[in-house]
Image (cartoon, rainbow, N blue to C red):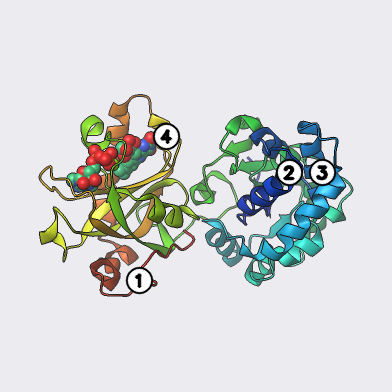
């Protein structure tokens, strides 16, 4: 594979979590005209320039009563006051600062028009700063994604041949643009349905397109010219900042103990939705305290835990769950209703689908071994004594404070 000389970032859905905002307001606009925003319509529009995206929706839904231009005007009016609310996705700052520190040139190639870009990043000037003058917007090229224009434009400006460019993209149309530009494309899907993306492939020269679950899973090791991360602790990634979560233990799907021999204390829906707003699905480790009915004698103790966040693909759950396995033997007791406090400090791996539960069980035990070991190390260990865990303050407002991981 060729040496990577330029990293090119997409913006929406890759750096910024704008998808939730866009879907919310696009849904409202369409509903006011009697239409529903379908997942097909989302898949064919994300990543494109705003007007192209609305035109794709109009075509997909056979909308005749209103034009794409009008829909765009209505949605922009709703979105503009909210753009700054978009959060930075997990792993973004870690990657940006890592490559900045090692003087790897980084560029931004977005479908967003220049004026909107400035609004979106108005309260996050540190991001724009990373790219210097290597930014190109949707209104500065002839054709938008899925055409390769913006990627070719920025490579030319940087004086780097496309084959030495590595693109980070989340949308089907953006991935197509990068591949057609002759670049290596790392797909970090923002769509749950992966069938709408170009198929990951390799050619004689190496990888053309590869898919990773989140930016936390990007490993420079696979790309000549990119420096390795130095922040990992035994291949786990410290979350910066750590997540502090307080919740209640509720009934889950009743599978953990019975089917796997691994009980997991599922968190209640309200804590879960607050904590999951920014969390990447995956397997994490950290520290835990529980108090309440059934576990009164443990209220002043801190346990190690290893936690699954996500859809448990082996069981094809429709909803996300957050389930720590507390690494302590409670003698088969249940403690539903107990209060649980977590400080989540490290990311271990993405959640995976396994052939058969035996392999899942083996992997979870391996995760537990990793957690037991790494929690003694580096930065992780000091959180064991954090006052938040014992309810002595030190948390953020006694509720949930979830930072953006990595
Ligand atoms: P559910 O699907 O309802 O979560 P599980 O089979 O996963 O059921 O069992 C989880 C319950 O077992 C927890 O809610 C808790 O009350 C209890 N439990 C006992 N030991 C542990 C442990 N070490 N870690 C987590 N939960 C445990
Ligand atoms: N479920 C999966 O489908 N894939 C996984 O990779 C996975 N990893 C897990 C790792 C840990 C440490 C724990 C505690 C659970 C994991 N699970 C995974 C979740 C498991 O399916 C779930 O706890 C049970 O189904 C009970 O709800
Ligand atoms: Mg459980």
Q: Earlier in the sequence, mark 2 or mark 1?
A: 2
Residue behind mark 4: 317
Q: CA distance from mark 4 to mark 1?
A: 31 Å
Q: Please rate how many residues cluster around mark 2, counting C-alpha atoms within 10 Å: few if below 14, some from 14 to 19, many from 20.
A: some
Residue behind mark 1: 395
User: Which residue appears at 71% of the width and 48% of the height?
Assistant: 26
Q: Earlier in the sequence, mark 3 or mark 2?
A: 2
Residue behind mark 3: 52
User: Which residue appears at 13% of the width and 48% of the height?
Assistant: 330
> Does 58 sit above or below residue 390?
above
Residue 297 location in percent, x, y? 10, 60
Q: Please rate how many residues cluster around mark 4, counting C-alpha atoms within 10 Å: few if below 14, some from 14 to 19, many from 20.
A: few
* Image-quadrant location for residue 184: top right
Q: Is 160 in front, or is 239?
A: 239
Q: Are marks 1 and 3 in contact (CB under 8 Å)?
A: no
Label 4, ligand 2: CB separation under 8 Å:
yes
Residue 282 location in percent, x, y? 42, 45
Q: Residue furthest right?
A: 142
User: Which residue appears at 69% of the width and 48% of the height?
Assistant: 28
The image quadrant in which ligand 3 is located: top left
> Does 255 sit above or below residue 297?
above
Q: CA distance from mark 2 to mark 4?
A: 29 Å
Q: Earlier in the sequence, mark 4 or mark 1?
A: 4
Q: Secondary structure at mark 1?
A: loop
């Amino acid at each position: 594979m060729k040496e990577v000389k330029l990293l090119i970032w997409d913006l929406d859905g890759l750096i910024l979590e704008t998808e939730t905002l866009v879907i919310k307001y696009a849904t409202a606009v369409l509903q006011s005209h009697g239409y529903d925003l379908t997942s097909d319509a989302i898949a064919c529009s994300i990543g494109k320039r705003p007007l192209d995206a609305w035109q794709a929706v109009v075509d997909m839904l056979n909308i005749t009563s209103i034009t794409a231009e009008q829909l765009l005007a209505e949605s922009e009016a709703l979105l503009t006051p909210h753009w700054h609310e978009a959060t930075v996705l997990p792993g973004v700052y870690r990657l940006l600062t890592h490559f900045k520190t090692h003087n790897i040139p980084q560029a931004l190639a977005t479908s967003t028009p220049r004026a909107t870009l400035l609004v979106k990043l108005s309260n996050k000037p540190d991001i724009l700063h990373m790219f210097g003058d290597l930014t190109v917007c949707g209104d500065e090229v002839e054709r938008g994604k899925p055409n390769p224009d913006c990627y070719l434009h920025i490579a030319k400006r940087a004086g780097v041949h496309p084959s030495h460019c590595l693109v980070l993209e989340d949308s089907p149309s953006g991935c197509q643009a990068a591949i057609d530009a002759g670049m290596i494309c790392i797909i970090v899907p923002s769509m749950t349905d992966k069938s709408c993306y170009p198929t990951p492939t390799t050619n004689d020269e190496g990888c053309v397109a590869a898919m990773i679950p989140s930016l936390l899973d990007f490993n420079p090791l696979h790309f000549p010219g990119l420096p390795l991360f130095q922040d990992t602790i035994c291949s786990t990634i410290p979350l910066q900042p750590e997540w502090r979560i307080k919740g209640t233990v509720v009934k889950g799907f009743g599978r953990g103990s019975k089917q796997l021999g691994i009980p997991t204390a599922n968190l209640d829906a309200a804590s879960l939705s607050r904590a999951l707003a920014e969390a990447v699905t995956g397997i994490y480790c950290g520290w835990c305290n529980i108090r309440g009915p059934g576990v009164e004698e443990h209220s002043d103790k801190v346990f190690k835990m290893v936690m699954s966040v996500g859809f448990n693909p082996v069981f094809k759950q429709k909803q996300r769950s957050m389930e720590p396995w507390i690494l302590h033997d409670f003698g088969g007791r249940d403690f539903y209703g107990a209060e649980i406090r977590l400080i989540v400090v490290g990311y271990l791996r993405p959640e995976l689908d396994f052939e058969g539960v035996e392999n899942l069980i083996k992997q979870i035990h391996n995760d537990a071994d990793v957690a037991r070991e790494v929690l003694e190390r580096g930065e992780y260990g000091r959180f064991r004594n954090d006052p938040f865990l014992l309810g002595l303050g030190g948390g953020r407002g006694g509720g949930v404070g979830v930072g953006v991981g990595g």
